[in-house]
Image: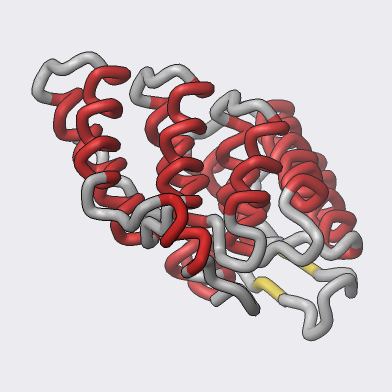
Amino acid sequence: MRALHAPRWRILGPALVALLLGQPLVVPALQGQASSVALAIPDAKTRLVVEREIARAVSRGLPSAPLVAKAMEGVTKLAPPDRIRAAVAAQAQRLEQARGLLGPTPTEAELVSGAEALAAGIPSAMLKQVRAAWPTQSVVMPLDVLTELVARGVPPKQALERVVTLMRRGATPVQIAGLGAAVQADVAAGLAPDAALEVRARGVMSLLPSPAAAAALAPSGRRP
């Protein structure tokens, strides 16, 4: 079964992505400053368009690493030049959309998780609801689990309701990740996705404080 985890490039970081490409990657010192990215794309026209797309995205304050990763994925799969260009442009658009939905100051990891959720077909309004549930905490894990649940066949509305309820009741990122992993295992064993989520969500809920206690203990301050 596929493990629930962040994409490998997110763990490795932009510098190691560049090494994997075998090409230099110059990351701007200040966000919003244009970057220079050289990609191992054989087609010169495609390479130039992709490099410019990444530079434009970085000039708008978006992270370059997920765009480099998207281009690398296309190169690895021997995708046609037009498809690589379209994939990078679409990823930049999703990152920008996620920034607006997860504002005011989402982290790079949150932007990436938001973009992946949008790519999986999760409605944009749901990203806002996840942010509203945890306005001061990182929403990377809830978004990743939501995306994984939908990918496993859970209806988006049901997945959102269960994940957000757990967030508001004081569940930790570890508990939310455990929910996602447990549902994956149940689905792999043959249980219907929606039924698996209901059973596992009730199990996590039984370990949490009451709604009143959860409201009193709601965290405040900066996101980790």
- Farthest front residue? 212
User: Along the horizontal axis of the image, is 191 left or right of 211?
Assistant: left
The structure residue drawn at horizontal position 64% and vertical position 73%, both measured from the top left corner, is 24
* Residue 54 x, y percent position in the rendering: 79, 55
Q: Quadrant of the C terminus?
A: bottom right
* Residue 149 x, y percent position in the rendering: 38, 31
The structure residue drawn at horizontal position 65% and vertical position 41%, both measured from the top left corner, is 129
* Residue 41 x, y percent position in the rendering: 64, 48
Above or below, 91 against 174 in this view is above
The structure residue drawn at horizontal position 40% and vertical position 35%, both measured from the top left corner, is 148
Q: How is the image coloured?
A: secondary structure
Q: Nearer the viewer, residue 101 or 15?
A: 101
* Residue 157 x, y percent position in the rendering: 52, 22
Can residue 156 be seen by looking at this rendering? yes
Q: Based on the displayed image, in which of its 4 quarters is residue 44 positioned?
A: top right
User: Along the horizontal axis of the image, is 35 left or right of 129?
Assistant: right
- Farthest bottom residue? 29
The structure residue drawn at horizontal position 73% and vertical position 46%, both measured from the top left corner, is 98
Q: Quadrant of the N terminus?
A: top left
Above or below, 190 against 149 in this view is above
User: Along the horizontal axis of the image, is 10 left or right of 99?
Assistant: left
